Amino acid sequence: MGLAQFGEDTKPVRRFVHRDHQSLVSWNVYDRPGHFAATQSPELLIADIQTFFGNLRKFSG
């Protein structure tokens, strides 16, 4: 699981996220707006998703 936290979003508390989601392998924080990231910061969201899945391929392949 990966988390992309954009500006203007609620800030998750890391200790609870790590406690409840042991499969978390990526956590990125961005200053740009993104409560609706697909429309507010689409290029940043796409880059984050591509990087996440690219890294998974490296570990699984």
Image: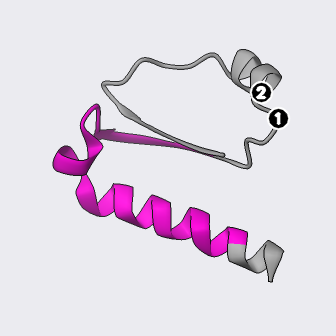
Give the farthest residue toward the left.
Answer: 39
Farthest residue to the bottom: give it. 61
Kind of residue at disc 1: Gln
Q: Note whether 32 is above or below 58 in the view shown.
A: above
* Total marks in image: 2
Residue 2 x %, y %: 61, 46
Q: Name the residue under label 1.
A: 22
Residue drawn at x 73%, y 16% is 16
Q: Give the range drawn in magenta.
A: 27-56
Q: Would residue 32 be found to the left or right of residue 47 on screen?
A: left
Tell me the SS state at disc 2.
helix
Q: Quadrant of residue 34?
A: top left
Based on the displayed image, in which of its 4 quarters is residue 9 positioned? top left
Is 46 included in the stretch rendered in magenta?
yes
Marks 2 and 1 close (CB-CB < 8 Å): yes
Q: Three-letter amino acid code at disc 2?
A: His
Kindly report which numbered mark, 2 or 1, lies closer to the viewer in this rendering: 1
Q: Is residue 38 above or below residue 34?
A: below
